[in-house]
Image (cartoon, rainbow, N blue to C red):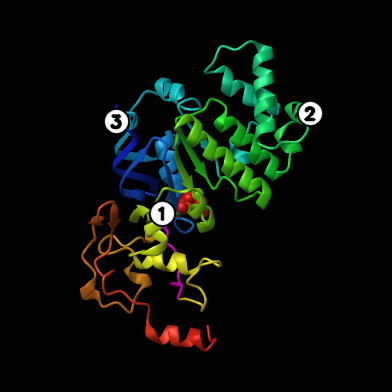
Amino acid sequence: MSNELLQIKNLKTSFRIGDDYYAAVDDVHLTLNKNETLAIVGESGCGKSALAFSVMGLHNRAKIEGNILFKDQDIVNISSNNLNKLRGKDMAMIFQDPLTALNPLMMIGDQIGETIFLHDNLTKDQRKAKVIDLLNKVGIPRAEHTYTQYPHELSGGMRQRVIIAMAIANDPELLIADEPTTALDATIQSQILGLINELKQDMHAGIILITHDLGVVAEMADRVAVMYAGEIVEITDVLTLFEDPLHPYTKSLLNSMPTSVQAKEKLHVIQGIVPSLQHLPRTGCRFSARIPWVPESEHEEHPQLHEVRPGHFVRCTCYKSFEFPEAHKEEQRHGIS
Ligand SMILES: Nc1ncnc2c1ncn2[C@@H]1O[C@H](COP(=O)(O)OP(=O)(O)OP(=O)(O)O)[C@@H](O)[C@H]1O
Ligand SMILES: [Mg+2]
């Protein structure tokens, strides 16, 4: 049997705004193997959650084109009945915003119990014991008490742990974790990352880890996809990403890391933000506006993601000659920024 858990081919996810559709995810090709953690990084608004929601079939009104194969089965046009069977059991997600993912009117214990109930046939007592065990596992103190609480009675960090307990309840084969630890303090963060790693090691799960934190990427990921304005602009193994990044955007992201080993002197970070969907350039390189010092002639009409060495893909035509502007480097060296 193939080792590929997930294959995404030519995925385009568009939202209707006014009379038009605008793509938040465009031309995305990805594979995820069993027992592999793929990190997805990129600034706010670049389409990471839109991609995750597409895989989980959670968009209500988006137009989804392309193929998403989960264990060789296309899940883009799957019936909602079959999707519900997969969701929560074979594939699960830790949501970025825990409040929207919890039912405010239901006790914590019942919510987690229900996730298990839908996919298992344990007795009531066995299920309760399993929920308590999960609450302990995700570091919730006084699990018996929390079992009877409602979401609004818990802090943000506790709610996030409940979401994580729900996601790992049925030992999913695919776990998508969307900023799973952003709201948590450092000790709990490493505990949660440890749990995610356990799922990978013990169950050979495939993990998609969405994060802004490149420290977390370094610690957790096997491969990394960098997204910009809906597209993947670079994808490679984690070591290569840190040691030999090629896309100007990836270089800039790495330079913005406070603990970057290269950051003995302050390095150049590209200014600006990801354009909103309505303001994406319809043609040309989507990133070119943020590197205006690179001559137009060096940008391809619309660069394609291409393999520059085995397993290392880049969407850029100017990366070979790309440099941050000397003038700016000089200013930084003299402490002017
Ligand atoms: N339901 C929607 N309708 C219209 N536009 C949307 C919708 N959901 C997301 N978008 C837009 O799609 C783009 C990508 O959003 P997305 O939430 O995927 O970004 P993200 O990379 O997850 O950002 P963050 O790091 O802030 O979570 C943004 O421009 C966002 O405004
Ligand atoms: Mg997001």
Bounds of the magenta segment: 268-276
* Left or right: 200 as drawn, with respect to 188: left
Q: Earlier in the sequence, mark 1 or mark 2?
A: 2
* Mark 2 and mark 3 residues within 8 Å of each other at the beta carbon: no
Label 2 sits on what residue type? His
Give percent across and percent down for residue 238: 41, 54
Label 3 sits on what residue type? Ser
Whole-number angstrom distance, CA of label 2 to CA of label 3: 44 Å
Q: Is residue 306 magenta?
A: no
Disc 3 crowd, CA 10 A, few/some/many (<14, 14-19, 20+): few
Label 1 sits on what residue type? Val
Q: Is residue 274 magenta?
A: yes
The number of numbered discs placed on residues in the rendered structure image is: 3
Residue at 72% across, 36% down: 140
Of the two numbered discs 2 and 3 in the rendering, the one whose residue sits closer to the viewer: 3
Residue at 29% across, 77% down: 294
Q: Quadrant of the N terminus?
A: top left
Tag 1 residue: 238
